[in-house]
Amino acid sequence: MKPFNLLLALFMLLKGTAFSQSHALVLQTDFGLKDGAVSAMKGVAFGVSPELKIFDLTHEIPAFNIWEAAYRLQQTAAYWPKGTVFVSVVDPGVGSERKSVVLQTKSGHYFVSPDNGTLTLIAESLGIEAVREIDEKRNRLPGSSASYTFHGRDVYAYTGARLAAGVIPFDSVGHRLPDTVLHIPYQQPTFRNNTVYGNIPILDVQYGNAWTNIDEKTLASLHLKFGDKLRIKISKDKMVIFNGVMPYVTTFASVPEGSPLAYQNSLMNLSFAINFGNFAEKHKVASGPEWMVEVTKE
């Protein structure tokens, strides 16, 4: 092989090796896209590695809503390849004593976030392999030490990009913490006394459907058939907001327009809707850890 061709082959091999070390970087914030905050985070990440692939999960988390940030991570993370790095910045305690961490899950994903409850659901669903506190002496955007209110740019985007690009291994994030994260309490899906209990973690905001965390296995305890009637009771802080009966069906068209229905959503969790209507708006139902649901078979 000629020297030039040998050098070219070596270059391509090294380039391929470097590329294979790069993983997707996925960003989530409550910043919105009205100003330059998200662009600044992407600029920092691009500065770490111009070959880094950067994606958006969402930047429309309602301001300060840590619970919704936790849910959106759980909703999407499992569909991304092993090695993907998620940066989630919903941080009303920025500048306080809350820890900045990277969670490595048993599935091989990484989550860069304040430890403020954002990691509640991911820790449960994907499992905790290790948690490390970000060492800002090593993993902070150079020249940003005087900035105290934009850790999303200066600490999280920078650290996440370095991890995703293979600039640093996970061990170099910082010292290891106990294998736990701050947990937001909520009603787990359970079955007792012929009733299924659960939580309404999120709304399908575009259509007003109420999504529960009641999974197929838990729902199966009721021994349902499509067409069965369900008694649904929804409460917030023990105050009943909705109490009604609806059929359990496969899809929206199974009931007339304007009628309520219970169905399994795209995550195979029990959900409630109105065909060509807005269930949440009509019944003043919202979502969060304080929203409870009880389901019985009529």
Image (spheres, rainbow, N blue to C red):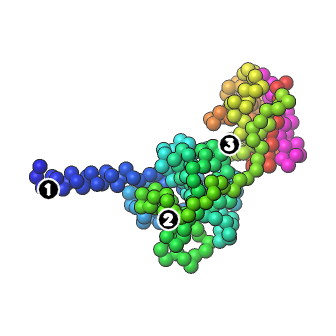
Q: Find disc 1 in the rendering and name its residue.
A: 4
Amino acid identity at mark 3: Asp
Q: As rendered, which of 213 and 180 lies closer to the eye?
A: 180
Q: Is residue 124 above or below residue 159?
A: above
As drawn, is 65 to the left or to the right of 153? right
* Distance (Cα) linking label 1 and label 3: 58 Å
Decide which of tag 1 and tag 3 comes sooner along the chain.
Answer: 1
From the top left corner, tell me how far across and down residue 18 is, in percent: 34, 55
198, 225: nearer the viewer: 198
Marks 2 and 1 close (CB-CB < 8 Å): no
User: Circle 3 is placed at which residue position?
Assistant: 204
Instruction: Write the residue at 73% across / 30% down.
Output: 219
Residue in front for this viewpoint, 231 or 198: 198
State how far apart marks 3 and 2 are (Cα). 32 Å
* Upstream in sequence: badge 2 or badge 1: 1
Secondary structure under the numbered disc 1 in the rendered image = helix
